Amino acid sequence: MGTILWLVQRFSSLIILSYILLIFINYFIKPYDVDAQVWFSDINSIQMKIFTSLFLIVMVLHALQGLKAVEDDYFTERTIGMFLPGTKHLAKFLRYSYRGFIGLVIIVLSYVTVLSYLMEV
Amino acid sequence: MSNEFSLSLYRFDPEKDERPYMSDYKISYPETGNMMVIDAIRQAQEKDSTVTFRRSCAQGVCGSDGVNMNGQNGLACITPVADVISRGKLEVRPLPGLPVIKDLIVDMKPFYEQYEKIKPFLDNEDEVTTGYERLQSPEDRDRLDGLYECVLCACCSTSCPSFWWNPEKFVGPAALLQAYRFIADTRDKQKKARLKKLNDAFSVYRCHGIMNCTSVCPKGLNPSKAINEIKKELRRIG
């Protein structure tokens, strides 16, 4: 399992990098700053929608792994007790609040992205 | 150069003290000017016999006097004061991340538990055909250089943030160096089983390549490289 997670993290970072590079390079080689229509037709093309969907999925996978590592390191009785002595009993509550916050952010972002961009409602 | 410096020692007796505190001692350099940190601690012990410190060989072989000197882990017996002193002051604290038993002595149990997990012995049930030893080519033997010399002082593992936060799950650089010492040994027959046991999100992959382990190792070993070799082997077996 460790190797699979390691590979997911590495390959997802490559996809994220290539998406960002595509947007960045296009910005310089296409007249986006003078003609917004070019931007709209590019970003709304089916290829770009597929690539954006893939980007969002791997971004979530990539971010979840990183955020889980933060949780494992810092939202524990040991770490919270070290930084704020006397509050280690709050570790569980803080851990679940942290997870809830991340879940909420993912739901809101997915909702906005799917409705306003991918499905163009 | 002044012939004296200030040695500040971490003090904590869980039976008496509510909180740890630092005690300062004026230490004189010997006439030769050369002094190891262990000699400075000994001088402090002569002034205050309650200072508690663990040592044995004083030659950098037993690995029992690992401490944190001005923020850097190392063996007190082979670290010259001149290498770690800053502005005439030297602070010596116990190895970070392990429970303190008293003053500079830490409980090594979490460290040894991880060492035990990796089964630090050759596992080979084949018959010894020569009758007296398992033979190995010089090339295969060379692969073990830089892996077997570890003295288990725990300087590396206790300088690793991943080990501080997850000492029960992350095996730590010292034990992983030993794990690779047996994975790389052609006489061992449990390579795959050893690797499979390490293939989870914590045991090896919790290493983020910070490399504190390599920079503090008093024997000049490279646990980071061994950990990367284990990761490569894990990817090879899938």
Image (tube, coloured by chain):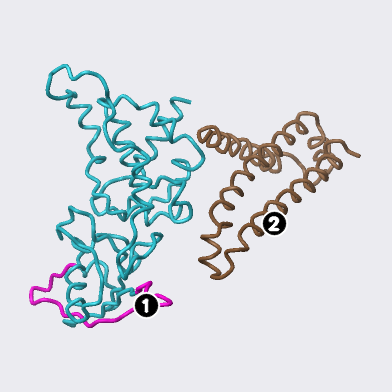
Give whichever of B197, B174 is nearer the camera. B197
Tell me, by letter, which chain the rendering colours brown.
Answer: A
User: Is B81 positioned to the left or the right of B159 in the image?
Assistant: left
Q: Give yes or no for residue B14 being in the magenta stretch.
A: yes
Residue A64: image quadrant is: top right
Residue B44: image quadrant is: bottom left
Which chain does the numbered disc 1 sit on? B
| Magenta region, main secondary structure | loop
Image coordinates of residue B187 in percent, x first then y, are 25, 25
Mark 2 sits on what residue? Answer: A97
Mark 1 sits on what residue? Answer: B16
Identity of the amino acid at label 2?
Ser
The residue under the point 71% across, 43% down is A27
Identity of the amino acid at label 1?
Lys
Give whichever of A1, B69 is nearer the camera. A1
> Is B9 situated above or below A50?
below
**How would you rate the neighbour count of disc 2 (Cα within 10 Å): few for under 14, some for 14-19, many for 20 or more?**
few
Label 1 in the same subunit as label 2: no
The circle on residue B161 is none
The residue under the point 35% across, 73% down is B13
Mark 1 against mark 2, which lies toward the viewer?
Answer: 1
Seen as rendered, the residue at the extreme top is: B129
The residue under the point 28% across, 53% down is B217
What range of the chain is rendered magenta? Answer: B12-36
The quarter of the picture where the N terminus of chain B appears is bottom left
Which chain does the numbered disc 2 sit on? A
Image coordinates of residue B165 in percent, x first then y, are 48, 55
Q: Secondary structure at mark 2?
A: helix
